[in-house]
Image: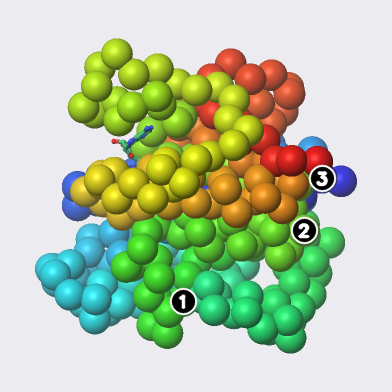
Amino acid sequence: MKRVVIKVGSHVLSDESSINQNRIDNLCKFLSELSDKFEVILVSSGAISAGQTKFNLPRTSVVNKQILSSLGQPYLMEIYSKTLSKYNKLAAQILLTAGDFDSRKITNHAKNVINGLLENKILPIINENDATGISEIVYGDNDRLSSAVAHYFDADLLVILSDIDGYYTADPSLDKSATIRPLVTVLSDEELNKTSYTGSKHGTGGITTKLLAADFLMKKGKDMFLASGFDLKVAREFLLNSNQIGGTIFKGKR
Ligand code: ADP
């Protein structure tokens, strides 16, 4: 059975000051459909946003974001557990930091747990452990963590469900004539080093961290698909019917 990692950005899960239950419902239904065909691992952002719905602390410092994340993480898991139970699915939480992948021993421990969860048809939900690692908070929204998860836990594909529905020829919020690039086989240094790409208010990654995630996987011979997390039609069609009707596929070298 093929293994896929689905990564969902915080902007998809939350609005200004609340969790968007409707989108979480759609996501959980989709995850349950996928798990009939694939082994599915979810990488979910959203702990800081979930924390902010419980307690009014400004996101003005790293430590405040860590506080909000530790407050919001169990709440986020509660929402996932409740919603997934409608589809008879159990969810388990795994918190990792990017640095965990530097140790083969730690990576193997986590991989054993992931394999065991998947064998038992339990959905592993991974987030960065924000209390000890701050790369998500500082660099961006789990995009790169999800590429490490896909590679080190032997997935065939990473799917990033974002507030943006693909990789455009230019920033679509600035250039209305920009179009989606359906297929990308190579990313230039210039594309990977652009720092002007800001991303949204809730999300922190912007497009650059998604491109870095794609580049990492492409160089390992793996693929990444970027599609909208607001409307799951494109991702559903791609994964369940092998039909690309939108989004961007970043194809790795074989
Ligand atoms: P998420 O919250 O889903 O992780 P972000 O909001 O952090 O996503 O990043 C996506 C944003 O990156 C888009 O909303 C868009 O404004 C911006 N962006 C800049 N350049 C591009 C591009 N070439 N293609 C797509 N999006 C781009």
Q: Name the residue beneath numbered marker 2.
A: 154
Pick the front one: 59 or 190: 190
Residue 173 in the figure: left or right of residue 143? left
Secondary structure under tag 2 reads: loop
Q: Are marks 3 and 1 in contact (CB under 8 Å)?
A: no
Figure quadrant of residue 139: bottom left
**Image point 74% across, 86% down: which residue?**
105
Q: Percent position (x, y) of residue 13?
A: 38, 47
Q: Percent position (x, y) of residue 244?
A: 63, 20
Q: Residues within 10 Å of mark 3 (few under 14, many from 20)?
A: few
Three-letter amino acid code of the residue under disc 1? Asn
Nearest to N terminus: mark 3 or mark 1: 3
Label 1, label 2: how many angstroms apart (C-alpha)? 21 Å
Dividing the image into 4 quarters, which one contains the C terminus? top right
Label 2, label 3: how many angstroms apart (C-alpha)? 10 Å
**Image point 53% across, 52% down: which residue?**
213
Residue 9 in the figure: left or right of residue 94? left
Q: Is residue 91 above or below residue 7?
A: below
Label 3 residue near ligand 1, CB within 8 Å: no
Q: Can I make out residue 114 in this image?
A: yes
Q: Percent position (x, y) of residue 48?
A: 31, 65
Q: Are marks 1 and 2 in contact (CB under 8 Å)?
A: no
| Ligand 1 placement by image quarter | top left
Three-letter amino acid code of the residue under disc 3? Lys
Q: Is residue 199 above or below residue 227?
A: below
Label 2 residue near ligand 1, CB within 8 Å: no
Secondary structure under tag 3 reads: loop
Q: Which mark is residue 129?
A: 1
Q: Residues within 10 Å of mark 1 (few under 14, many from 20)?
A: some
Three-letter amino acid code of the residue under disc 2? Asp
Q: Name the residue beneath numbered marker 3.
A: 2
